[in-house]
Image (spheres, rainbow, N blue to C red):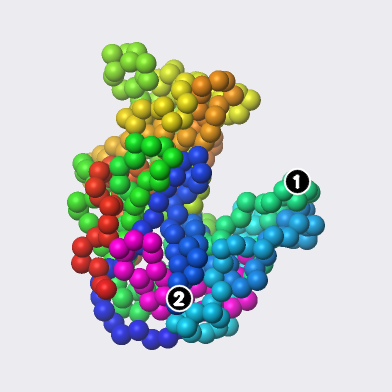
Amino acid sequence: MVAVAPAASTLAIPVFYQPMIDQQVIANISWGTPASKVIPTVVDTGSYGFWVAGPDAIVNSGSPYLGQMGSCNQTIDPAFHWPESSSHSGPYDEGKAVFLYGGGGKRIVCPTAVNDTMSFHNDYPPIENVQVASCDFIQIKSSSTTCRGAHYDKSIMGLAPIPAIQGGPLLHSELLKQGRLGSGVFSTWFDAQPADINEPQVGTLLFGAVPADKYTGDLVTLRNSGYERAETGYYYVGMPEVRAVHINGEGDGKKTTIPAANPDKLPQCLADSGTWGMTLPTDDKAFYAATGLEADRPFISPRYPAACADIPVDAAFELVFTGTDGKTASVKIPYRSLAEGEGQAPNTCRLNLQLGDNGCTLGGTFYASAFIAHDDEARTVQIAQGAVAGSAQGPPKGLRL
């Protein structure tokens, strides 16, 4: 990688979240000079490595078997055609990698890497000289053998501190090595939900600082128990308490604590901004009784008794986290943020929430609701109530230009 003069600072990337369309944390990134088309990039705290579809990249699908070529090929669009950029350097062999997701059901082959400028769609300043793996082949295992067009990612920015066994660029650690950040932490937060459910909820990914004016209530510190697992490098926190009020006002508006499906065996929760929706090991019958929601059978997800666009903005349940010092942070999860589409019954909305599971995943929906700071050196995750109005309408002050 080309050397960069040290300049301890902070760097920020605008992100967004949009229920019913893409319940992951997404960054719209343009690459190079002139700037490429906007490439939607998954900001993923559940994986490592940074890659983008490169020139002539294709997606192969249509086979239900791992590693077997299917009959369907799609040209990836948009993609980063880096030879056309006057500001790129490389290609570099040391950045090549193969990334696997979903147990190998998705395989990304990246034969090289390049350095270039990332730019954004608003007033956030560009970030120069960033290395990214350039990928030319994506293979997706699919049960369907007909070519209807597979859903695929164009780019993933992995932020988990996982050892890069297969190689590939690591954005956060590279920024630190180059002396471009004043601190090893990174934070994410979102603005309040827009009134229109079809409008994106905007947010910020900030490298190098934990601002104090982007959340409400206490910012509690949780141990990242991911380092205690056999496969280290993921962000895991203790199971929060789940509370809710009835959507119809039953119970005089009092909050009910909803028990876990197996209170004697509470799992740790994976904090993964690249996962759609949420999974909670909460007793489903108790959840429906406390909230007034019902199962959207034959699916196992809940549904809200109104069209998705008509769900009140303040209708939510809460997750309560207890920090290492005993303080608690309550994070409201709006039902609108979980909206997935029309339910099985008329005038209802299916929610992307899986209940009663053995595991616990705090996906993109959680990140859209909470303020989260990740500190890999201290091995902690800090959480507070996010979605503060006006907190992400523009870049934070003091960014390096």
Q: Residues within 10 Å of mark 1 (few under 14, many from 20)?
A: few
Estimate the spatial distance between the alpha carbons at disc 1 and disc 2, rounded to whole Å: 39 Å
Q: Identify the residue at horizontal 35%, vertical 79% (top origin).
A: 178
x then y, percent, for residue 393: 28, 52
First in residue order: circle 1 vs circle 2: 2
Would you identify the image quadrant in which residue 60 lies?
A: bottom right
Mark 1 residue element: loop
133 inside magenta stretch: yes
Q: Identify the residue at horizontal 40%, vertical 43% (top origin).
A: 199
x then y, percent, for residue 247: 37, 20
x then y, percent, for residue 340: 52, 36
x then y, percent, for residue 400: 26, 72
Amino acid identity at mark 2: Pro
Q: Identify the residue at horizontal 45%, vertical 72% (top origin).
A: 35
Mark 2 residue element: loop
What range is drawn magenta here? 108-135
- Residue, disc 2: 34
Q: Is residue 239 visible?
A: yes
- Residue, disc 1: 144
315 inside magenta stretch: no
Would you identify the image quadrant in which residue 159 lies?
A: bottom left
Q: Main secondary structure of the magenta part?
A: strand
| Residue sitting nearer the eye, 389 or 84 | 84
